[in-house]
Amino acid sequence: MKQQATKKRLLMLLVATMAMVFALGLTACGGGGSSSSSASGGGDAPSGDVITLISSDSTSPGSAGNKWQLAFKDKLEAVSGGTMVVDYHGNGELGGDADTQTQLQANDIQIDVTQPATLVSFVPGFAVFDAHMVFATSSPEANDVVLNGDNPFTQGLQASAEENNMHILGWLQNGTFRQVTSNKEIRTLDDFKGFQIRTMENNNHMAFWKALGADPTPLAWAEVYISLQNGTVEGQENATDTSVGNSLQEVQKYCCLTNHVLYSNVMVVSKGCWDSLTDEQKGFLEEACKQATAEIAPTLGQLDQDSRKVMTDAGMEIIEFGDDFFNAVQDNADVQKLNESIDEQSGGLLTLLKEEIEKANK
């Protein structure tokens, strides 16, 4: 583990050095470049310069977030005619989610793709996505209208992001969900009692599992495989492609289709970078994100099915739940109290989200 940590630090140093060297020849959206050509500092970036955007994520190769980033990179360079390029570093090359989001706020990284739960400690409005079962009966098409449309919910969430030096560029989803994988057989709500589940370090997520009687333990993603293997925890929750992308089918027996949180990825831009761009350049970013989303979103359903097949081929059992299970979760008094707290944390965004979901599904 110590050797791996040393290698990661050396890689991050190498990436930073390469970015500085690259900046000598290309305009960077963050610092770097000469004062006459740099896009930093809040002014409009000269449209004739080539702008390089450092992009990061912690997603595994082949996952939805990784595919979205690669498609965005290609689309941006195409729609901008090569005047905007992406220097992409995936799979946690530039650090974990907290590391890259801190760098994003400082405009050391310009673009990050992540799942919304990781952003709550940086942008309070993202707590709205910690509410469980909100999207359970909503169609993928309605979800897209809500998340990528211009409405009171997205306006409020964007305001929360920009107050914290981030700008939301777009969302990727297609009606698939985060699911539980486990070495404990879970078929009823009572089976969650005492269940040792790895979670992200997110108080609302931990509170949800505690409400079901489980024992949540926050662990860094890099520690999950070995922790499942040695029994430190019994299970974890994630999208199926994320789970198989990290070979968890080797150390888990069951995949429980709890559908508790919509599986979505969000693309965020450093506000310092965003404010430095011309309207034309902002348009390139928005169009590239829109095209990349249109390309990758339709594949998510098949990706989910393919990932489940990898699990069953490895010997895992898929466990499904009926309406009684989902109703019992939503009727749980502690879950309802948690959602009331989440609405307060997010400045009323959960109320707006529910209203927009209801309108979009009519």
Image (cartoon, rainbow, N blue to C red):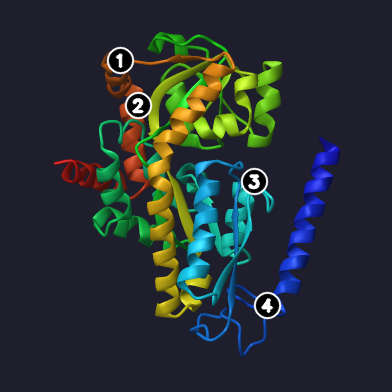
x, y (%) of residue 266?
A: 45, 51
Which sits in the foreground, 360 or 345? 360
Instruction: For mark 4, give the secondary structure.
Output: loop
Q: Which mark identifies residue 322?
A: 1
Instruction: For mark 3, give the secondary structure.
Output: loop
- Identified by mark 2, the residue type is Val
Q: Earlier in the sequence, mark 3 or mark 1?
A: 3
Which sits in the foreground, 87 or 234? 87
Q: Is residue 124 above or below residue 50?
A: above
Which marked residue is nearer to the observer: mark 2 or mark 4?
4
Q: CA distance from mark 1 to mark 4?
A: 56 Å
Q: Earlier in the sequence, mark 1 or mark 2?
A: 1
Answer whether residue 220 is visible to the viewer in this image: no
Q: CA distance from mark 3 to mark 4?
A: 25 Å
Q: CA distance from mark 2 to mark 4?
A: 48 Å
Q: Which mark identifies residue 183?
A: none
Q: Earlier in the sequence, mark 3 or mark 4?
A: 4
- Identified by mark 1, the residue type is Gly
Q: Earlier in the sequence, mark 2 or mark 4?
A: 4
Quickly name the residue at label 3: 91
- Identified by mark 3, the residue type is Asn
| Quadrant of the snapshot with the C terminus | top left
Quickly name the residue at label 2: 335
x, y (%) of residue 104?
A: 57, 61
Which marked residue is nearer to the observer: mark 3 or mark 2?
3
Name the residue located 30 percent from the left edge and 40 percent from the top edge.
140
Q: Earlier in the sequence, mark 3 or mark 2?
A: 3
